[in-house]
Image (tube, coloured by chain):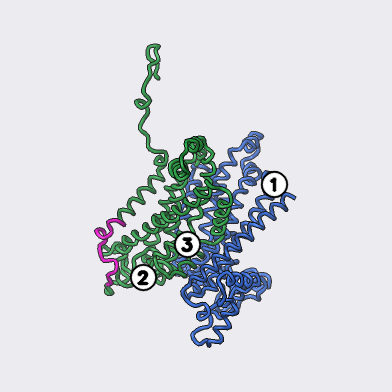
Amino acid sequence: MALLAFFLRRLVGFVAVMVGVSIITFALSHVVPTDPAGAALGDHATDAQIKQFRAQYGLDKPVPQQYWIYVTNLVHGDLGLSIHSRRPVAADLHDFFPATFELSLTALLFSILIGVPAGVASAVARNRLPDHVVRVLSLIGGSLPIFWLGLLLIGFFYGRLGWLPSGSRIDQFIPPPTAITGLFTVDAALSGNTKAFWSSAQHLILPALTLGYFSTAIIARMMRSSMLEVLNQDYVLAARAKGLRQGKVIWRHALRNALIPTVTTIGVTFGSLLSGAVLTETIFSWPGLGRYATTAAISLDFPAVMGVTLLAALVYTAANLMVDLGYHWLDPRIRSG
Amino acid sequence: MVEGAGVLVPVPATSVRPRRWPAWLRSPLTVAGLVLITLFALAALFAPLLAPADPLKQVLSTRLKPPTAAHWLGTDQLGRDVLSRMLFGARISLLVGVVVVGLAGSLGTFVGLVAGYTGGWLDEGLMRLTDVFFAFPALILAMAIAGALGPSLTNAIIAIAVVSWPVYARLVRAQVLTLREREYVEAARSLGASTPRIIWQHILPNTLAPLLVQASFDMGGAILAAAGLSFIGFGTQPPTPEWGVMISDGRSYISTQPWLSLFPGLAILFTVAAFNLIGDGLRDAFDPRLHGKT
């Protein structure tokens, strides 16, 4: 019952935030100096076409009414027409989202698989060599421009060694796997297409490493600090006093509790990966939302930019909502409180 | 007090207390960060004196030269001296950090003070507004704002400040909520001090420590964000020497002339790392729970 009440409260907050987000994207779309109707329909549009477009999107109505039409359209999945692709923005997002999702998910997996053990090792070996190494690497991860890291990786692994490709999702001579989920590696594995699987996996390595390094650093730092806190707790001392082996104390007793704050970090990190994807996708010519948004912003294709912004905010807020619920479920103290 | 010949002799506290460095300066890493920032600031300040060449001067006969005695960090695709461009680039990066933190910090502090002190519906409304801004992925929103206003350094600064202020608002509000119940604030109130006076003289000074920590981290964050925006074409425009623009210029030459991107990237890395080290040191010094733990 308490969980349901908590969920409903958070859901109301979620809706309120999304309304705020829609107001800001609406306001931004309306400070653009170009006429949205003219920009969307091009130079050769007739007056009648422009009039019809303005009526369809309510651009001939007072601003509050325009906002109402904008929100009504949003609720019906109509994000407007992309000036660049001349297609509905929702259709473009549908096509570009899987590439970004595959990249972000791989980067997040990489961050968790490296960041969590690194943070634990750092805390356990506090002030010794492994700790220093993890702390220096975390400091670098939190300080380097990811677009620069991407370039260096391309220069080394593609330019010098020739081991990995420099961009796109799959080799140009290999047909993409049959679309099931939209994630090339998953689709290739599901359809048993080994060639496409290896090619898409190879294409994923450098962008995922680039995008994931920053979040790995954040997760390792968080894990280290929460692990240090937990290792000083009485129940860990008691486990040690009972004669339990160090490995068992760490993995069975300390890690479970130290992971709780890290879960929050992981959730927030997933949302921010979308932001990092803008730069990563630009460098690696990755056909995802980030590259779509950049191209759209350069050509002042505001319906497209706002579509990506809205979707990114939706994913971020939904990820936070799920983290909150997961946190609530993981930590009995919060449930009882 | 010291014991001498069975008599307790009072000793003034100042005579026995050794001179100590401020807590945040006791970490060698923090000092390293401070030294690095001082060096970058001096390089930026004296760029016209230190730069061996005009950062905009093109000498096509010496294009794409590797680092030599004549050009310590090589030359770019238009024969411009990379070291000179980096020195002038430091001015822009540091300026972006200071201005963004100044703008976002001032706005966020003001909102946090008003929300925390007044409470009620205004507090609720302002905090929901920060929730909305937190929901936007910062770089995408900054890109949208910079795109709407037109690509330039000034608009990039405005865009980054717009996405950075909510964190200060939350931080200051949390501080104010605890400070406003303190006895000295009650005392000031009962003595008839006005609300602005209480906020300005009694509450604001006590929120400065966490603000300073956040500002140190944000200086680095702002420099990274501005370089990222410039890299994709929404910040500083060529031929102005800026580190993000320089990395972007060197993009096509990464396999053959890597120094074009390598050195400006290292400059960003060291500057941001230095601000992060200072932030870490300040946070540890201001948080008694962390003393001796990190």
Instruction: Name the mark on residue A146.
Output: 3
Q: Which residue is mark 2?
A: B238
Chain that is coloured green in the picture? B
Please tell me how crowded label 3 is: few (under 14), some (14-19), or many (20+) other residues with Cα within 10 Å.
Answer: many
* Residue A184 visible in the displayed image: no
Of pointers 1 and 3, the one earlier in the residue sequence? 3
Please tell me how crowded label 1 is: few (under 14), some (14-19), or many (20+) other residues with Cα within 10 Å.
Answer: few
| A251 over A102 or under it: above or below | above
B45 drawn magenta? yes
Instruction: Name the mark on residue A335.
Output: 1
Instruction: Name the mark on residue B97.
Output: none
The amino acid pointed to by label 1 is Arg
| Mark toward the viewer: 1 or 3 | 1
**Distance in Å between CA atoms under marks 1 and 3:** 39 Å
Q: Residue at horizontal 55%, vertical 47%?
A: A224
Q: Is residue A332 left or right of residue A90?
A: right
Q: Are marks 2 and 3 on the same chain?
A: no
Residues in magenta, as a range = B44-58
Q: Are marks 2 and 1 in contact (CB under 8 Å)?
A: no
B188 drawn magenta? no
Tint applied to chain A in the drawing: blue
The amino acid pointed to by label 3 is Ile
The amino acid pointed to by label 2 is Pro
The foreground one among A240 and A303 is: A303
